[in-house]
Amino acid sequence: MEAPEQIKNQWRRATIANGPAPLTWYRAPGKWGWVCMLSVVIATENAERLLVPTLTALVPGATAGLVSEVIVADAGSSDATRMIADAAGCRFEATPAPLGHRLRQAAAGARAGWLLFLRPGVVLDSTWTEETKCFIENVELGGKARAAAFRPPGGADTLAATRTMMAGG
């Protein structure tokens, strides 16, 4: 079934303005819309027990077509982290490099246009899929580059430390 002309024109405008957009159109029963693709990056080190609930929370995003891949950027775990990641269909990248390097390497190899960085043990709220789709659609259709950060109370110090590591410090 063909997409309506309005959807095709929006896709063309997004592609011209922003380069190849990480959105594609889809048809749900009774309506047309956008599908955005997301690469999830999880940095781990001996995180077998924490990884399972985090991966479980990503399943709704995968079944909705939002999550295209999960990359586990591991520091050389000696537990079952690799086995769990493999069983869940994640791409597993192991290197003893510092956290910032592992995150940069995973981000550079990501296939999707949008990235979601999670810590092992983080369990996303049940509404995360819809909220993420809405955010990405609004940014893509609005033509403005944006980012969002969700952190627990008291997480500002951790965010600053992560920025420093990502910058190579």
Image: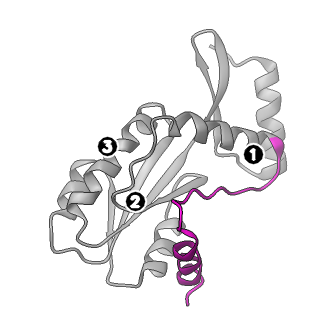
Boundaries of the magenta span: 142-169
Residue type, numbered disc 3: Thr
Q: Image quarter for residue 169?
A: bottom right
Residue type, numbered disc 2: Ile
In the displayed orientation, state which residue is furthest to the bottom: 169
- The nearer-to-camera label among 3 and 1 is 3
Q: How far apart are the two marked residues, 2 and 1, measured between alpha carbons?
A: 24 Å
Circles 2 and 1, Cβ within 8 Å, touching? The answer is no
* Frontmost residue, 2 versus 139: 139
Q: On the image, numbered disc 2 is attached to which residue?
A: 71
Q: On the image, numbered disc 3 is attached to which residue?
A: 56
In the displayed orientation, state which residue is furthest to the top: 30
Query: Residue 39, position in %: x, y?
Result: 50, 53
In which quadrant of the rendered image does the N terminus lie? top right
Q: On the image, numbered disc 1 is attached to which residue?
A: 139
Tag 3 or tag 2, which sits nearer the N-term? 3
Residue type, numbered disc 1: Val
Tag 1 or tag 2, which sits nearer the N-term? 2
Identify the residue at horizontal 60%, vertical 38% (top origin).
Answer: 131
Identify the residue at horizontal 76%, vertical 25% (top origin).
Answer: 7
Vertical position of residue 149 compared to residue 96: above or below: above
In the image, is residue 115 part of the stretch drawn in magenta? no
| 10 Å crowding of disc 3: few (<14), some (14-19), many (20+) | few
Could you say whether the residue bearing mark 1 is in a helix, strand or loop?
helix
Vertical position of residue 47 compared to residue 32: above or below: below
Query: Residue 43, position in %: x, y?
Result: 38, 68
